[in-house]
Amino acid sequence: MGVLALVAGLLLAAGCGGSDDETSGADEWANSVCSAVTSWTTSVTAAAQSLQGGNLSENSLESAVDDVTEATKTLADDVEDAGKPDTANGQQAKDLVEQLANDLDEGVQTIGDALDDVSGSSGILTAISQISGTLATMSSQVGDIVDELEQLDPAGELEDAINDSDECTSLRSGG
């Protein structure tokens, strides 16, 4: 369960978003992005929890991978829809978040490859191990983005927006 806690904690801490040339106020942007990250994390956590308890099968693993894939696509769409924050370094924040979305998509592809390699019960256990490792990597990528966004925001506009956002409340409390 440690991987789930790590994934939830780091992903829920993320205050990131943006794409397109649209801009949004820092507060609106923080609300949109925090909501998207919270939804993604909830979906990924539920998918991982569905694999606990000894009733593992290739079908249950495939269902969990499908859930993670769909959640990641939704996150990418939601982050893109958030636009870029109307801050001094909004374009750089947008670029970082687009890279995060690409990195998470690569993680989903790795998870899918692990599923494709499943053969028998030992294959399921191997796949779960690979998936857990990939989820840990994805959470680390989110943590790295958080650090980079904080460095981009010397005036504290994004940090203030995240701290003031009702949508980010669960993120600030660690879930």
Image (spheres, rainbow, N blue to C red):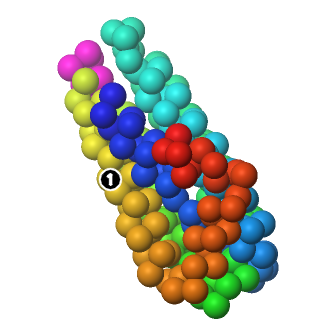
Give me the residue at 64% from left, 90% from top.
88
Task: State the quadrant of the N terminus.
Answer: top left
Q: Which residue is mark 1?
A: 137
Left or right: where 91 falls relative to 54:
right
Helix or strand or loop: what does disc 1 sit on? Answer: helix
The relative height of residue 4 versus residue 82 in the rendered view (above or below) is above
Q: Quadrant of residue 91?
A: bottom right
Q: Quadrant of residue 57?
A: top left
Left or right: where 128 falls relative to 87:
left
The relative height of residue 105 versus residue 67 in the rendered view (above or below) is below
> Is residue 77 visible in this depiction of the protein?
no
Total label count? 1
Residue range highlighted in magenta: 118-124
Give me the residue at 74% from left, 68% from top.
27
Main secondary structure along the magenta-highlighted residues: helix
The relative height of residue 18 versus residue 23 in the rendered view (above or below) is above
Viewer-proximal residue, 108 or 28?
Answer: 28
Left or right: where 95 falls relative to 60:
right
Give me the residue at 64% from left, 79% from top.
157
Residue type for callout 1: Thr
Left or right: where 107 falls relative to 90:
left
Where is residue 164? Give x, y as percent. 69, 62
Where is residue 108? Give x, y as percent. 45, 48
